[in-house]
Amino acid sequence: MGHAAKALKQTHNNMDIDKVEDLMDEVREQQQIAEEISSVISNPIGFGQEVDEDDLLKELEEMEQEELDKQLLDTTPEQQLPEVPAEVPVAVPRTKQKETEESDELKELAEWAN
């Protein structure tokens, strides 16, 4: 214990209360700098801001609408259309029987209307 007391006495002889206060001030300053650095590192760039979900949903809807507009304006046919016939279609001649049936029906209709 005597040796410990002598060691403490010798250590304290070299120290002054002003030196201890100066040393503690330096330690506090370094701790503040370390805290500032830590806070800057812990907040990633661009992610510290609050994001509004309504704005994100609106932006998503706009992007979907743009994609839909692109699809609607795309007029390239996905499938081949049938070819246009080169020959002129020929009308099928009416038969006499159909003409007489129609004229008979018209006569009956005219009689009924009178």
Image (tube, rainbow, N blue to C red):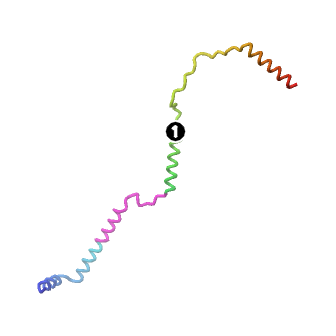
| Direction from residue 104 to residue 59 in the image, left or right | left
| Direction from residue 5 to residue 68 in the image, left or right | right
Q: Amino acid at mark 1?
A: Gln
Could you say which quadrant of the image residue 103 lies in?
top right
Residue that numbered label 1 is attached to: 71
Where's residue 70, x and y in %? 51, 39
Residue at 50%, 55% in the rendered image: 55
Residue at 79%, 20% in the rendered image: 105
Q: Nearer the viewer, residue 110 or 50?
A: 110
Q: Secondary structure at mark 1?
A: helix
Residue 85's place in the image compared with 42, above or below, is above
Where's residue 33, x and y in %? 31, 69
Where's residue 86, x and y in %? 57, 17
Q: Nearer the viewer, residue 26 or 56?
A: 56
Label 1 CA crowd tier, 10 Å (few <14, some 14–19, many 20+): few
Image quadrant holding the C terminus, namely: top right
Residue 59's place in the image compared with 36, above or below, is above
Return the residue found at the far right. Answer: 114
Where's residue 102, x and y in %? 77, 19
Residue at 37%, 62% in the rendered image: 43
Q: Is residue 2 magenta?
A: no
Give, as a single range, the part of the protein colored magenta. 30-52
Could you say which quadrant of the image residue 41 lies in?
bottom left
Q: Nearer the viewer, residue 113 or 10?
A: 113
Image quadrant holding the N terminus, namely: bottom left
